Image: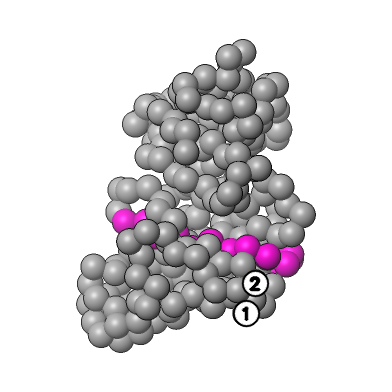
Amino acid sequence: GAVVSQHPSRVICKSGTSVKIECRSLDFQATTMFWYRQFPKQSLMLMATSNEGSKATYEQGVEKDKFLINHASLTLSTLTVTSAHPEDSSFYICSARGGGMTYEQYFGPGTRLTVT
Amino acid sequence: DAKTTQPNSMESNEEEPVHLPCNHSTISGTDYIHWYRQLPSQGPEYVIHGLTSNVNNRMASLAIAEDRKSSTLILHRATLRDAAVYYCILRDPSGAGSYQLTFGKGTKLSVIP
């Protein structure tokens, strides 16, 4: 199957700072990327959907000014958590699908964010 | 979105078959049944999907009831590596937001050595 990578795999930052998470599709062009958040012992919650070259579509309740998503190329999307607070500590997971893929969606390994 | 219902947890002995059930009584005619699994501290991975007929692949089998209101994911010989949370998800490829996957709570499968 296709490979999606995320970097970093884990990050610790101080409250009030910003942190950027990268999501890359390594062997296919990702026309659509998704960002999820998962709190401990809970399921994945979709945060936003982004199509290459377009603005991301955010799910209800997700602050677009706090979670900045950029999908500037067909292999890279970034999620920037701005002015992070301890309640933003979570497991962030991206997934990607390529043009022509009808059902395949490939997930990254996730990024563990801890805000102190 | 049509919802799915899965048991919170299940246990299996290693090397034995596992049947993971999923109820989806409000499934529409165009909904595909997808299964993903998530190993601890990892992103989900695709397992299998189907529409009406039973499906087999190298990872598992998917048995779909004739009325499509339920399905069962079958792992033929559970290994310790199969310990994960298994998600049963309905997706309509023709609808708006059709590529989104909505995750429920899934079934946490424990495999006993």
Q: Earlier in the sequence, mark 2 or mark 1?
A: 2
**Looking at the picture, which amino acid does disc 2 mark?**
Glu
For mark 2, name the chain.
Answer: A
> Mark 1: few, some, or many residues within 10 Å (few <14, many ≥20)?
some
Residue annotated with mark 2:
A52
Specify the segment rendered in magenta.
A26-39
Task: Assign a secondary structure to mark 1.
Answer: strand
Q: Image height check: is B82 above or below A48?
A: above
Q: Image height check: is B45 above or below A66?
A: above
**Residue B110 appears in the picture as rendered:** no
Most foreground residue, A100 or B111: A100
Q: Residue furthest right?
A: A100
> Mark 2: few, some, or many residues within 10 Å (few <14, many ≥20)?
some
Q: Is residue A100 left or right of residue A58?
A: right
Mark seen at residue A72: 1
Task: Assign a secondary structure to mark 2.
Answer: loop
Picture quadrant where residue A50 is located? bottom right
Give the total of numbered labels.
Answer: 2
Residue A3 coordinates in the image, percent (x, y): 66, 61
- The residue shown at (67%, 49%) is A104
Say if mark 2 contacts mark 1, CB within 8 Å.
Answer: yes
Residue A76 coordinates in the image, percent (x, y): 62, 75
Picture quadrant where residue B75 is located? top right
**Looking at the picture, which amino acid does disc 1 mark?**
Ala
- The residue shown at (57%, 19%) is B68
